[in-house]
Amino acid sequence: MLRLFLFFLLFTSLYSTTVEDFRWEDGVTYSDFLQANKLPRKPLLDNLDVDDARLVEEIRAGVHCNYLKDSNGEIEQVLIPLNDELQIHIYKVKDSYAFEAIPIVCETKVDAFTLKMQSNPSIDIKNETGSINLVSIFLTSFGTSLDFTTLRKDDNLVMIYEQKYRSGNPFSMPTLKAAMIETNKRPHYIYLNDDDRYYDEKGSQVESFLLATPVKNARISSRFSKRRFHPVLKKWKAHLGMDYAARTGTPVVSAGNGTVIYAATMGSYGKLIKIRHKDGYETRYAHLNAYRNGIRNGKPVKKGQTIGYVGTTGRSTGPHLHFELRKDGRAINPAQRVQLTTKKLQGKEKKAFEKLSNNYNESIALHLKNETKYIKQKAIDKSCYFNNTTKKEYVLN
């Protein structure tokens, strides 16, 4: 049963509960966390079904989590984000604890700022905002389409981006909606189109990392989803990849140039291959029937090279390839990257894009005129007050 997500800042005076933030430390497993906090392993790990057991493997180092503790310091609830839409919820039930995956309740805002270049985008964006994430999305979105060595001092930069906020703090990676940067006073624009791809002012796609389809002529049987409610199991789940339905033995190719970093069986993935690519990208190929001869750790592979064969090993209901794409350890939607060539918009798509880009151009011009500065969000109070006479169950958002 999904519980009511409310972050209480109101006073009911009868019972005080404190929220404590913590960051997931590098090298700490979910099992380590349970042991360190004296939380029962059996209901929170050993008894989990296969899907939930896989979810705990998605916890990333550095993610901001929350304890909810009573006045005696005893843990009432724990929230551990898995991505920007789904989180693990551990909560007390009588004398024990229970586990569930639930949606993250957060607020989404569109923010913007301008700055004048003094050094380079990485240094100047970091100095202005203090955010490595904003640096990352700017550089990744422009890709290799622009030579930043031609920048001059006092060239203008504008970023319009979407940021999710959880408990008043920026949460997860922001999404760049539009940006403009000058090189020697010549402006260059990029826009996030309705197809979730970036285009320049001419409607040509801007992309530095394109993937080949891992199984040729295969039907996509299941798409990427950070959260979905299973109608039969009545549970929230995530599908952090794309499934390609194909016959057993169908060749599977590497989606890009890279190096094999894993080729073995891994739990519900079955026979799995992981390939590391440039710029922090990693692809995964699961449920394989077999590996191609010579595929092993450390093996360099080329885009389009056969690496294995479709199968149904691991937790699988039939022959298919489960394909994942990750950026710096985070699962991202492969559909945004899988195609053979860059795209240039035409016809109705071009007209819709021109309307979108004109709207962003007006916003960019306004921000430049107003010299919009980055605004750091204020932290909120960490004390919550609950009426312990009510029978409702509450969860931090």
Image (cartoon, rainbow, N blue to C red):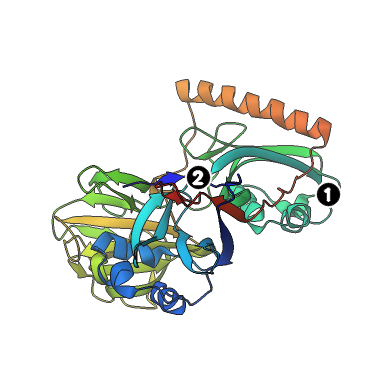
Real-space CA distance between mark 1 and mark 2, rounded to the nearest whole angstrom: 48 Å
Camera-side residue of 375 and 383:
383
Report the residue marked by disc 2.
Answer: 6
Dot 1, how many residues are within 10 Å of its Cα: few (below 14), some (14-19), or many (20+)?
some
Q: Secondary structure at mark 2?
A: loop
Would residue 223 be seen by someone viewing this image from the given angle?
no
Is residue 379 left or right of 241 when viewed as pictured?
A: right
Image coords of residue 35 (percent x, y): 41, 79
Image coords of residue 229 (percent x, y): 30, 44
Is residue 226 left or right of 18 when viewed as pictured?
A: left
Report the residue marked by disc 1.
Answer: 152
Question: Which callout, 1 or 2, points at the residue further toward the start of the chain?
Answer: 2
Residue shown at 31% from the left, 70% from the top: 45
Image coords of residue 357 (percent x, y): 61, 28
Q: Count the marks: how many?
A: 2
Is residue 134 left or right of 186 when viewed as pictured?
A: left
Camera-side residue of 172 and 396:
396
Residue shown at 54% from the left, 26% from the top: 353
